[in-house]
Amino acid sequence: MKKIKIAYIGGGSKAWARVFMKDLALAKDLSGEIALYDIDLPAAELNRRIGERINAHPNTISKWDYKVYPEIGTALDGADFVICSILPGTFDEMEGDVHLPEEYGIYQSVGDTVGPGGVLRAMRTVPIYEGFAREIKAHCPDAWVINLTNPMTACTKTLYDVFPEIKAFGCCHEVFHAQEFLSCAVHELMGVPRPHRSEIIIDACGVNHFTWITEANYKGTDLLKILPEFIDKFYEQGYCEHVGSQPQDFRDNPFRYGNKVKMDLFRRFGVLAAAGDRHLVEFLNNGWYIKDKADAESWLFHLTTVAYRKQDRLDKIAQSQRIADGEEQIDVSHSDEEVVELMKALLGLIPPKVSNANVVNVGQMPQLPLGSVVETNCVFAHNSLKPVTSKPLPNDVNALVLRNAINIENTYYGIKARDLNRIFEAFINQPLCSSLTVAQGKELFNKMLAATEAYLKDFYPYTRL
Amino acid sequence: MKKIKIAYIGGGSKAWARVFMKDLALAKDLSGEIALYDIDLPAAELNRRIGERINAHPNTISKWDYKVYPEIGTALDGADFVICSILPGTFDEMEGDVHLPEEYGIYQSVGDTVGPGGVLRAMRTVPIYEGFAREIKAHCPDAWVINLTNPMTACTKTLYDVFPEIKAFGCCHEVFHAQEFLSCAVHELMGVPRPHRSEIIIDACGVNHFTWITEANYKGTDLLKILPEFIDKFYEQGYCEHVGSQPQDFRDNPFRYGNKVKMDLFRRFGVLAAAGDRHLVEFLNNGWYIKDKADAESWLFHLTTVAYRKQDRLDKIAQSQRIADGEEQIDVSHSDEEVVELMKALLGLIPPKVSNANVVNVGQMPQLPLGSVVETNCVFAHNSLKPVTSKPLPNDVNALVLRNAINIENTYYGIKARDLNRIFEAFINQPLCSSLTVAQGKELFNKMLAATEAYLKDFYPYTRL
Amino acid sequence: MKKIKIAYIGGGSKAWARVFMKDLALAKDLSGEIALYDIDLPAAELNRRIGERINAHPNTISKWDYKVYPEIGTALDGADFVICSILPGTFDEMEGDVHLPEEYGIYQSVGDTVGPGGVLRAMRTVPIYEGFAREIKAHCPDAWVINLTNPMTACTKTLYDVFPEIKAFGCCHEVFHAQEFLSCAVHELMGVPRPHRSEIIIDACGVNHFTWITEANYKGTDLLKILPEFIDKFYEQGYCEHVGSQPQDFRDNPFRYGNKVKMDLFRRFGVLAAAGDRHLVEFLNNGWYIKDKADAESWLFHLTTVAYRKQDRLDKIAQSQRIADGEEQIDVSHSDEEVVELMKALLGLIPPKVSNANVVNVGQMPQLPLGSVVETNCVFAHNSLKPVTSKPLPNDVNALVLRNAINIENTYYGIKARDLNRIFEAFINQPLCSSLTVAQGKELFNKMLAATEAYLKDFYPYTRL
Amino acid sequence: MKKIKIAYIGGGSKAWARVFMKDLALAKDLSGEIALYDIDLPAAELNRRIGERINAHPNTISKWDYKVYPEIGTALDGADFVICSILPGTFDEMEGDVHLPEEYGIYQSVGDTVGPGGVLRAMRTVPIYEGFAREIKAHCPDAWVINLTNPMTACTKTLYDVFPEIKAFGCCHEVFHAQEFLSCAVHELMGVPRPHRSEIIIDACGVNHFTWITEANYKGTDLLKILPEFIDKFYEQGYCEHVGSQPQDFRDNPFRYGNKVKMDLFRRFGVLAAAGDRHLVEFLNNGWYIKDKADAESWLFHLTTVAYRKQDRLDKIAQSQRIADGEEQIDVSHSDEEVVELMKALLGLIPPKVSNANVVNVGQMPQLPLGSVVETNCVFAHNSLKPVTSKPLPNDVNALVLRNAINIENTYYGIKARDLNRIFEAFINQPLCSSLTVAQGKELFNKMLAATEAYLKDFYPYTRL
């Protein structure tokens, strides 16, 4: 059994930490220490106590040594893996990101990746990640660093830009949902039970949350060839890949959607967008699918309000508390996440594994700038992560992806230079900002800066344009 | 004196042909034949008669042999140079290009380069240029081909794509206007008479009509450093670089403008856009400078109506007729154009010359796709045109240029494939179409297709989406 | 069970065909037709008869329909896979390739890849492969084409250059030997039984027969880190990875070698050359490891004479005859080859598989020219072969690989143009020709051309310099 | 008149300093200070006194303020231009560079660029240039830095690698000689007096001392088309481009040569090598043109002995002394050098000028690695040096240039890392070392290291392999 140290940065109150700890508890060939660090120390302590509950669970195979560190440096010292999963700012700041643009007719279904909200969130996050990169360089330069925080692309870019020798990648399960969607098509058209997503073999590329599947196959059947029939059948009513869910569930659950945007994009472009519809629309002119709330509903998705997120968070914290206190039983079983499998591949414990990840473009996507962060298939092997060259995107999809990739790069470099003018030009150039005049854009940008000022003032010389 | 054959394709009724013929008449080291070909045969004949008038003029140094050819092949046979200067379709078709989008709130100041009008014009022009490329390959594969037709980028791309060994370049004088504008700044700030534009040394790059000056110098003074002072002085009232003109002249003359857009872009980006403001705004979201007619006026430019163009054309034809008939005297004097100088450089008659031209990107603009057509400085020498590597554009300007460059490429490849769906995706992705919904875009596209159908039906299997 | 058609071009008298047919006989999920074509029709017929023997064998799971075609076109019609495995010319021609250079002090251990022999062999082979590419385009453009013929790089290049949409790759097992060598190191140093080579996970890149392993791992152990100890132990006496063989066996068996060159190169460069030593030395200045026969022996390998090859071939044909006649029993068991596994992956019958292959460089080896053929890891999935980006080679290894890659490209383009002068410049620039004067080079080249003239005169306008 | 400061680093005893000072004395639009710094302080002082003599000369238009600085930092402070022209080590060290390899059958005609001598010289020079780059960064980061020292490519590479924002270029007049050679062809074949080299318009590219002319024109005549006739006429007896010289003069003057190598290379490759034959042969296998002294003579060039250089240097120092003392009159007249003209172009005092220079490859030579230093045409304009994209080299010439370019890069990176093993692999891979065994190479390398040890020991942890 391999003994390793995993530094877990953040994750204080997200359900994801629990999922990860349970997967680790079931990894029979791995053991060691999980070093918990969070700027919210009690949240880290809460995770530690949940860890102990997992250790005590009868299903648990591998017991881990959970420790809370008050300093990031000691948490990182000697780590083999670092997991970064933070919330930059609080949901109060996110409220500005998501809802202020609505005053200017800009609606966002998520608000954490691109669009006005994504830019502001990047402004808060990148300076924090600059610090992470420096700490990792100082304390565990050989560790594999796994980023889970959004905006994924900017976070991963920061890590590499500050510490180019870093061994980092960004992990996101949105592509899995598209595989699930394809697995539904297999079921509906081929008359077989839904296969597991791992049986849907794909080639995908793009930037995180705007990745595209250009090849898909199930046991020798070319799924992109049969998809038109599936779409013809379900275009109107939508189709939800979540087991037990209906397309209309988006009305009650803002994380659900009917995949109608995805189907429409497939009709237009012939390749399958590989993220939830809520993410996809934020990379496109706002006139296309999210002119207003009614437009969104007509495409079978809802806008996720921050009020909802706040309540959801409170619920999750309360649940964590109950688990830690032993008031609620925790169920230790395998999740559908892949992170632990990727770790094993990097440790050389399992054969090389092909999965999608976000890393610096060294040629795997020749259509996008070298040095930008892209999401493609990668081969994970012992101490080795090698991107796989991807099938080129159709010209018109490339136009959409490239525009966003360049905006993300420009946002990043503007933030790196702490130059509000450069950031603003990336902001006003967001597809979601297409309808703004320059004057409106400036006004909105300033309002959004003010709303998040507490998290900017330590890093930026100015906090308004 | 070098004997050459110049094939002049088109140009039947444009004043530019006269300018060119006069410059040739004053070229003491050049002589030979000018082979005139136009699908409008009488227009070519009119040019021939004007040519004879120029030959007879006392200022004329070099008499040329003007011949009209009814077939393009014989006009091209053995040509050393080919000039391409056509109007694709008539102004009736251009009326649809320019004015139909107004029904959807999209205003265009020119309508012949990008934006909805540019896309439709490219649809008419590219198939014609495919024919030109094939004829040149068959009849004069070693000739230097000079394109003057808009959309410049798509025309030049077509020539190279159909006949990769072609020695073609696109020539445009818009950059000259930016040099003139800088010459005004020299005059106003340095207290000297306006220098000739050739004394303003620049580095420029971009795509035609959206080229940017990244370095500018007059006798050792860095002009981009003094420009802010000039702009502070003239931002409000504007400044017109045409001798004897005022900024407000744009109200009567649609080819005039007050350079306020250019000054505003300089303030935003720190580099100088090198085309007339009327062109520049068409490469940007329509909310930025051309939300409507009033917005345009506030930025000191007008929309050029096609009605105006029609009248202007009638006036020019009438004038040509009078000149041919000897009713109006022609003045044979040097123009401010450079084409004849470039020809001399290519013939090795003068030292190598640095000037801007539109050619295939072989690395002169690493930020744009290799193989796309870009405008940069080039060295013209004997039988040799070599692009000069250009200073990289600022990130945020690059985002704007790249988006348009990709759209132009995609428009071209959609037309090459005669695939209306691909063309539409390039159409709806135009910055000027930012405010459209997809449904509106389709409706508008179909209306525009119908308006220009006569010039499409021979080339496209379908003429509506 | 998937029904497919496999066209097998050549292979008339090579043992490899038998191996392949046996692996197919054991593939439980594959069946269909094997279409045999060889310019030596009786040889194809012999293979058919061996196929029938295999069909009749009790171990056989999948019976194939073996058919001999007198025309290549009908053999290819509708094929799902094409195997190309030919001998270009006869061993008489190869005699000139290998032994004429000895008159000028140039010794070759193989003579079929690079060096003077490789260039001449390419001159015979490329024109034949031009024909194959055209036939494949005409008869089975969607087939996967697997090349086994040497020179591997030039053959694969020809296929792609003549028919760019071809789905071709080159397969070679030399890299497997390096994995076996590493498996020996695992055994010797880690005290475990020799693991199967598939457990040695590697990253490799280069050109065929001159590929380098830059990363190697066995269950989490970094093998390149332990290799120095292994080499210190076995450098002097050598080490043979063939089970049951001794390093000194090279004295009797010209396909054996003691891996001393490989160990010496590792000491010099820190990465492991991944082909047999006999191949490696041909990519290097002849003063390095093969100055003469004694030099070769001191490095524990022999020169393979063509006399030996001729006898070996006679033996194999005799054996084939005996098998076909039922005089010798054929043993139907799995080989160590991977081709059938790769075919299954391409058919989507097994999960995506990572293995090394020779394909056009689309960025998997940024150090080598895009468009040249390189060998790296690739992901084989349903109807999809995607090269994996490889770890960059150390600078000094890159210098050696790049020089050869460029020579191979130049040899190819010289042959494509049928231009003996261009081919000669690639010939004289071979590392093995380092010691020649230009005059000697010309003399040798002409002698070698004469020796192979029968196979050149149909393709080249001249057959001497 | 523009006031500038020029820092002149080195040049203590080379005639070139005098030439430069005289050109400056005749530059009517330039004046200011010339700051002299040399590790040999009296040599700098001697130059100062020569400067005073030039100031006093009646032809002098611009008097300069000559100052000697004992510290490099103060010499550089505030400089507008920096000239670097040093001798790394003494001629005693160069004796090892040039003559030790002769013991192994390797002859060198120059020994300062590539080949064994070039590698050792680079080992002495690069660490010094690392210091220069740091001083320039600290004292005059905006200065234009002009390098004249060999090995040119490695020196220029060092400057850019240590201080990437440096504005440096390498200047070499070898290309001028090729222009002169072409001017001879014009004279001999076209029956006109020899034109000035500036009238021979060329496109050239490569690495310094191994640059190739791919296009050449004189007043519209394509010179590469008429060159075969010239070569047929003069191949046997040779042709010397120096006015008043004969091809056989090489027997007495080691800087003369008969251009027979250049003519032979043209016959082989169709493009014209643009450096003296003495340089060219050092980039090629030593069997090609310099197997031994007799071989060199048969190609009409001699090997320059270091004994000759030593005497030549004594003569020049003595002359400098006489000039400084007023015993010998100095003649103040324009030289044929271009450096002062390039400086004027960079100051914006004259129109942009096209000339060849050595700078980092940003795409001007796509066949060579980006980031390596190459020599091509460049446009010199106000505070701007932009490489011109060059015509691609023929494949086989590219193979030769690329091999050397990679070796130079690898030599540089080996030196940067102070890693003798990496340097050795670049050493043994030199074309001039083609005939060596590895063991011979190591022995020779160690001897050469010992001979230059005094200049290595401060920089390298080890001074033998």
Image: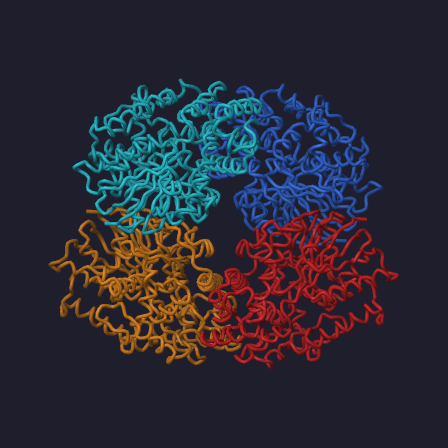
Chain colours: A blue, B cyan, C red, D orange
Q: Is residue A392 visible?
A: yes
* Residue A155 placement (x, y as % from top left): 58, 39
Name the residue at the front extreme.
B70
Quarter of the figure with residue D284: bottom left
D379 shown above or below A294:
below
Q: Nearer the viewer, residue B220 or C175?
A: C175
* Residue A246 placement (x, y as % from top left): 75, 25
Q: Nearer the viewer, residue A325 or B399?
A: B399
Quarter of the figure with residue C8: bottom right
Q: Is residue A134 visible?
A: no
Name the residue at the right extreme.
C58
* Residue C373 placement (x, y as % from top left): 58, 57
D193 shown above or below A453:
below
Q: Nearer the viewer, residue D241 or D419?
A: D241
Image position of D48 (left or right of B119) = left
Name the residue at the left extreme.
D58
Tally the marks: 0
Quarter of the figure with residue C454: bottom right
At 71% across and 30% down in the image, what residue appears? A317
* Residue B165 placement (x, y as % from top left): 44, 49
